[in-house]
Image (spheres, grey):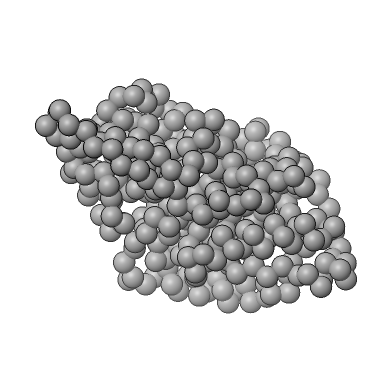
Amino acid sequence: MLCKFFARASLSPRISVLLAGFASLGVWPVTEAAASTRLDVKSPSVVVLSWDQGKILYERNADEVRPIASLSKMFAGLVIHDDCKLDWNSQHEMSPENRDAARGGDFSKLKTGWKFTVEDLMHAALMRSDNRAFPALAEACGMTPAQLGERMTSRARELGLAKTIFSEPTGLSPNNVSTAHEVALMLQEVTKRPRLQAIMAKRSYWMTAHLPDGKRTQRYEIRNTDRLLQSRDFSVIGGKTGFTNLARYCLAIAVRTVEYGDLGMVLMGAEGKLTRFADVRRIYQWLKKNSTVAALDQNNMGNQASKSKQFNDASKSEAPLKDASF
């Protein structure tokens, strides 16, 4: 069956051109050989797009609306990059408001009263997923986190992303929601910004904190939370990890392959910390083994309504949110 993704209305010209390429995709039959190597993906919501070929290579519950945790940060980066026009060498002092906006998240290395450059804050947000970074960058742009969230939602609508909503930039809020399809298109848009793409592809980065006395600095290293940067099968163009108790483990990643060109992969709702990374490797090996493009339905995809009900029930729970920067 043809994916519901093609039915969106009011799309921007840029996204409409992309979707027109997807709409031309037919449904390939699953051969016996393909059936014998059927893909066993653990993440409940997945999409794999070939950006070069304009094809959907695999999808599973890809239009289901789910909380996206720190995947929000890559779109916050796009809005700050495009709209604020900040001097990346300028410094911003971390305020109590920045600390409070990140409350409930993982430990932050961005201490109140310390100053960091815009460039360092962007690295902290996109590589280490530090929850204080984008509230600080919003403040530098003259916005509250909520106002930045509104601008992010507005920008998503401009790109034709009808199901994506942001209430703030960190992803700690359960109201930050999207679908795997729309996150994949967000990722493609973000990687078109060379400066942001380069940050997301770095394994490590040295930050410089300017201490409150105005005389001393402290340098420390941060490491990217994306473990696939170590892969030898493909080169990582860019991506973002995310986790909250409600969203579970998420990953948006763009990879460059010999066989398929540039691929955008989004995996949401995985139960294990390493599952999303293993799923990417499983998908890649499956694509290499099968000559067919993809089966849009898998045997283990049944009970989708039941899974949606379980997700909706879980969204009403009182469990505290935590972004573990994984």
- Evaluate whether residue 29 shows in this view: yes
Q: Name the spot of residue 172 as percent of width and height, x first.
A: 36, 55
Of 216 and 61, the residue lying toward us:
216
Numbered circles on residues, count: 0
- The C terminus is located in which quarter? bottom left
Q: Residue at x 56, y 37 (%)?
A: 191
Of 134 and 284, the residue lying toward us:
284
Q: Name the spot of residue 135 as percent of width and height, x first.
A: 30, 41
| 42 to the left or right of 211 | right
Q: Residue at x 19, y 42 (%)?
A: 112
Q: Name the spot of residue 249 as percent of width and height, x first.
A: 48, 62
Q: Name the spot of residue 318 as percent of width and height, x first.
A: 32, 71
The residue at the far left in this view is 213
| 262 to the left or right of 65 | right
Indicate whether 87 appears above or below 2.
above
Res. 299 image quadrant = bottom right
Q: Residue at x 77, y 57 (%)?
A: 288
Res. 34 image quadrant = bottom right
- Evaluate whether residue 160 shows in this view: no
Indicate whether 54 appears above or below 105.
above
- The N terminus is located in which quarter? bottom right
Q: Residue at x 34, y 61 (%)?
A: 322
Indicate whether 155 appears above or below 49.
above
